[in-house]
Amino acid sequence: MEPGKITTGIVLNADGSFSHVPTKIVVIDGKPYAQINSLTNSVYSVIYSPITFADVNTHWAKEAVNDMGSRLVIDGSGEGSFEPGRDITRAEFADDYHKGTRGHAARYREGYFQGCNQGQLVL
């Protein structure tokens, strides 16, 4: 395994699609391993899928945006663009958050998101 040739771990979903799983490369006794963080037992793999969005080339968040795209957390706005200055909807944020945490939903205190009661599960 070449640590520089892994962008993320993926899980095979029941419908045949695959999704990002939070992953990091760790070194144990001098040997690199992909540490995939999941709460379930499933079929996993690691992939190398570098993605760059052309319109973030000079943006301060270029590295983070391209990293999240490569990890299949964000999709961009299409045709290789991300549109870093564009507003996103609450639904888009929730979708990106869900993909980024692989559904490890959080409980929010009252007032964190408008319309959510204390202890209400969001996502």
Image (cartoon, rainbow, N blue to C red):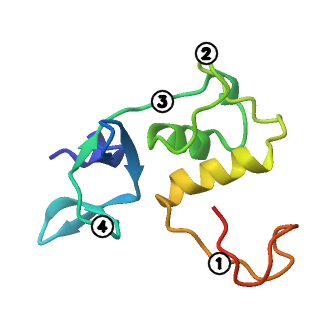
**Above or below, 72 relative to 116:** above
Amino acid type for the residue under numbered disc 2: Glu
Amino acid type for the residue under numbered disc 3: Ile
Q: Give neighbour class at mark 4: few <14, some 14-19, many 20+ (Cα, 10 Å).
A: few
Which residue is identified by label 2?
79
Q: Which mark is residue 107?
A: 1
Q: Which mark is residue 40?
A: 4
Q: Which mark is residue 51?
A: 3
Find the distance from the CA under tag 1 to the CA under tag 3: 32 Å
Nearer to us of marks 1 and 3 is 1
Where does the image place residue 85, in percent across and percent down from the top left? 83, 35
Q: Give neighbour class at mark 1: few <14, some 14-19, many 20+ (Cα, 10 Å).
A: some
Q: Tell which circle, 2 or 4, labels the residue nearer the N-terminal end.
A: 4
Residue in the image at 69% along x and 24% along y: 55
Relative placement, left or right, of 92 versus 5 is: right
On the image, which quarter does residue 41 sit in? bottom left
Where does the image place residue 92, in percent across and percent down from the top left? 70, 44
Q: Secondary structure at mark 1?
A: loop
Relative placement, left or right, of 71 versus 48 is: right
Amino acid type for the residue under numbered disc 4: Thr
Q: Give neighbour class at mark 2: few <14, some 14-19, many 20+ (Cα, 10 Å).
A: few
Residue in the image at 52% along x and 45% along y: 73
Q: Tell which circle, 2 or 3, labels the residue nearer the N-terminal end.
A: 3
